[in-house]
Image (cartoon, rainbow, N blue to C red):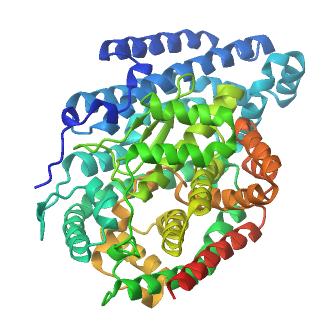
Amino acid sequence: MDKILTRSEVPTAATWNLDDLFVSQEAWEAGLKAVQTEADKLTRFKGRLGESAQLLLECLTEQEALTEQAGKVGAYARLRQSEDGTNPKNLANSAKIGDVLSGIQSSLTFIESEILELPADLIERYFTEEPGLAPFERSLRRLLDTKPHRLSPETEEALASLGEVLGAPYRIYLRGKLSDMTFDDITTREGTKPVSFRLYENKYEMSADTDLRRAAYASFSKSLHGSRHTFAESYATEVKKQVVLSRLRGYSSVTDMLLQPQQVTREMYNNIHDTLLTELAPHMRRLAALKKRELGLDKLMFCDLKAPLDPEFNPSITYEEACSTIREALAVLGPEYDQIVESAFSQRWIDYADNAGKSTGAFCSSIYGVHSYILVTWADNMRGTFTLAHEVGHAGHLMLAARNQRLTNARPSLYFIEAPSTMNELLLADHLLSRAEDKRMRRWIILQLLNTYYHNYVTHLLEAELQRRVYKLAEANEPITADTLSRLKGEVLSEFWGDELELDEGAKLTWMRQPHYYMSLYPYTYAAGLTASTAAAQLIREEGQPAVDRWLQVLKAGGSLTPLELMKLAGVDMTTSEPISRAVAYVGSLVDELEALYN
């Protein structure tokens, strides 16, 4: 029987090297203490920010430095927990850092409160008198935009002190998912096999063996079903928190509150949902019908959607081969970008081991002043290569931004954050297609590219649509229960897939699988980013180096521009639904070609 390894049993080379953050637990604890000391020093500015522009600059500069330090100690604890959520020390450190950072945030809420209390003409005079404030002007003006929704300084301080408590729903979800949930083994022709979140989502769900795939799905769904009420209570608490905060702050809705920091209008938000849900569904249904026919399935179940369309042609790829292929594909972005990619692969920025307690999915954590760290779980398949290229896209983007922007302007809006990552997937697909030697290889690569659109335009957007409906119910004071969430998810899936998909109870539990529901309005941004990257990639194909140069400018701009400004710089106008429709048409053309290749 295959064995799920413990963290101590996996090869060191397959793990990330967190020594670049802190070389030991003791060094981390010293760093944590230093952050607390620096935070205490900042309180000397309390009640004084109206004295002079120079004093405000001094305060903001020290706060920025503290934020950088806190980012390092926070990242270390989070990454340790992500690599092994069964380790008691990792859990304790995560809890400790949460308490400390909440306390610091509470003690420093006076900075924003006092800035908001300054007369508008005084702040304008400060900008004129002190050129050193220029890097902070954008963040200060965004802060001033929130003034109508700010509560009293005392209330803001109290809310900040409850940061660890208010973040509990997400932590409870992670504890249940990564530390406590267990799955029944399954029996196959090859013997008994273990099931886990990682094994199912990274391996079994994409298996060509229908019996194995469906057996693993049954085991997976059984465990989800057994935890549904706990997970629903956790998510309902998160939703209730957002509803209460939006009402306290005087927003017309939760959606408006969560869109403001993204610098996104309600129209931009709805354009993504409404256009894709309407225009993309027919193309995805054609793809589902093709898969059902070619695989000879009696029915197409939810667990069959990621099955390989050509089971006998599914080339495996090692991690090392994937790294080499990604570097070749991204060479078009130039030497500076390539240096970041090479460092990620050679200097252990990436944790690709598979061990018990490791976080599911994949992510990139970019720490200002250090570098990025990437978590994936490698399973020797091409989908993993696209996932790795995606996370490297986050790393390349945020490291270029950090090299060219102050911390206060380094991170862009969530609305744009997935564009650089999905761009790398598109560049990888172009590279692979340019080397495709026969029809079978070409259709296999097209399927990988369609998986990118499936992941961002289907998986995440249907998450986002569930979010949209959940907030609507919550704002009408309707209870959010496990049955409610499963019903809503079933409706979303049924409306999108129509008669092409046989909807089972396990599919309705998909709301339990992703953590994005706890990350504000994050799910829909995957679709927004892929729309932008689809348009920008087309410009790179048509124009070559000028379009590449603009894209690199965009990456280096970080958060110094609004998402619409960033996309405009790349040559994409996201003020209308037109780029979304064009991206959907491109997906349709891929399905057309795939149908032709099979016919």
Q: Does the image show residue 155?
A: no
Q: Is residue 510 above or below residue 350?
A: below
**Which corner quadrant of the image does residue 480 belong to?**
bottom left
Question: Residue sitting at 37 percent across and 28 percent down?
Answer: 77
The picture places residue 349, in percent across and down from the top left corner, at: 45, 32
**Which corner quadrant of the image does residue 537 belong to?**
bottom right
Given residues 316 and 249, the one toward you in this image is 316
- Total marks drawn? 0
Given residues 47 and 417, the one toward you in this image is 417
The picture places residue 18, in percent across and down from the top left corner, at: 39, 25
Position of 93 compared to 240: left or right? left
Q: Does the image show residue 207?
A: yes
The picture places residue 9, in percent across and down from the top left corner, at: 19, 35
Query: Which quadrant, please, contains the N terminus?
Result: bottom left
The picture places residue 598, in percent across and down from the top left corner, at: 50, 84
Position of 332 compared to 68: left or right? right
Residue farthest toward the front in the current orientation of the protein:
437
Q: Is residue 260 above or below residue 573?
A: above
**Which corner quadrant of the image does residue 137 belong to?**
top right
Question: Residue sitting at 53 percent across and 28 percent down?
Answer: 371
Question: Residue sitting at 62 percent across and 21 percent down?
Answer: 64
Given residues 68 and 102, the one toward you in this image is 68
